[in-house]
Amino acid sequence: MPKRMLVPYLALCLLPAAAHAEGAREPDVVRVGQQETVQKDVPFVPTREETVKRMLGMAGVTKDDVVYDLGSGDGRIVVMAAQKMGARAVGVDIDPERIREANDNARRAGVTSRVEFRQQSLFDAEIKDATVVTLYLLPSVNLKIRYKLLTELKPGTRIVSHDFDMGDWRPDRKESVGDDTVYLWIVPASVEGTYGLTVPTARGETPATLTLRQEFQDVSGTLKLNGKSLPLAELILQGDAISFRTAEGPELHFRGRVEGTRIHGNVMPSGGQSRAFTATRNGSGS
């Protein structure tokens, strides 16, 4: 991927997705005599209990969360999320033997009313209602599923992976648990583009143009005001929350929320009062 995006944000992951597109919809089945075995994307290797605790802890799982474990194996992450944190949880695994084992473990833990296990390919799973997604896959599989995670999950959804990263998508946090590594990402809103807005200046409310460039959660940009292009500093994008300030010219501090093609929030001029602003992405209509 080029260092600086020249195409819209969601195209960042098209190459990994395209690489997987052929054959992603149906798992391969190998028939041996009268038996059928499912070709799995990832071998089953259980995660240690201490690592499971750290994964759920880093994601800040509470009773209000919906946790999806993609490649859920024996269901230990799903069961712990429900039993210890009170969350609702869904496990997805293509192996029917693992699904049976996971359901047995949920019954023994007394959490069957809060969990569900689905036998299907993780690439086919409906995940849009997840607030937390957990993974213990492989580097190549993480790259293949990255596009799905970025396009189907809501901004602010937390993703936690045991041992393997997401390529050039920088983790928001990384911790060691013994010999294991746990990575955390927060799904960023899509903000790439040019926006129209008005900002308070000494001349009153003044039309301005905000241009944002994005590489996952890393954002840079400029504010064009009174004919001058002012660089922005301290840009922070976490989920749908964004903040930044002008690095030159009139000192303006912005803090807002991304809602589709608009950013709503407040702008604080130096020595002035906070005022509401709405920035609308060009081409998005009124």
Image (cartoon, helix red, strand yellow):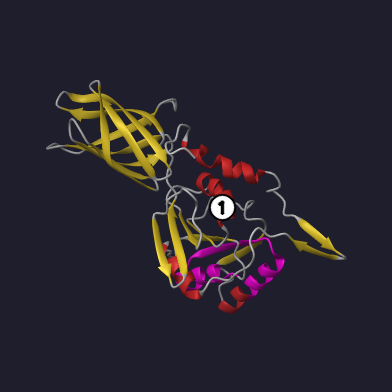
* Residue extending farthest right: 33
Q: Is residue 74 magenta?
A: no
Instruction: Give coordinates of residue 242: x percent, y percent.
Output: 33, 43
Quadrant position of the C terminus in the picture:
top left
Instruction: Give coordinates of residue 109: x percent, y percent.
Output: 56, 77
For label 1, the SS is loop
Dominant SS of magenta comes to helix
* Residue extending farthest left: 271
Q: Which residues are magenta?
A: 75-104
**Horizontal placement of 208 versus 38: left or right?**
left
**Horizontal placement of 130 versus 93: left or right?**
left
Q: Residue at the spot x=60%, y=51% of the render?
A: 126
Picture quadrant where residue 46 is located: bottom right
Residue under numbered circle 1? 127
Q: Residue at the spot x=42%, y=54% of the render?
A: 171
Q: Residue at the spot x=17%, y=31% of the render?
A: 250
Instruction: Give coordinates of residue 14: x percent, y percent.
Output: 56, 40
Number of numbered discs on residues: 1
Determine if residue 231 is in view: yes
**Label 1: how many Cα within 10 Å (few below 14, some 14–19, many 20+):** many
Q: Is residue 231 above or below residue 50?
A: above
Determine if residue 60 is in view: no
Q: Residue at the spot x=61%, y=71% of the render?
A: 74
**Horizontal placement of 25 versus 49: left or right?**
right
Camera-side residue of 3 and 259: 3
Camera-side residue of 277 and 208: 208
Q: Is residue 95 magenta?
A: yes
Residue kind at label 1, given as amino acid type: Ile
**Horizontal placement of 245 versus 219: left or right?**
left
Camera-side residue of 99 and 58: 58
Q: Is residue 153 above or below residue 112?
A: above
Camera-side residue of 31 and 121: 31
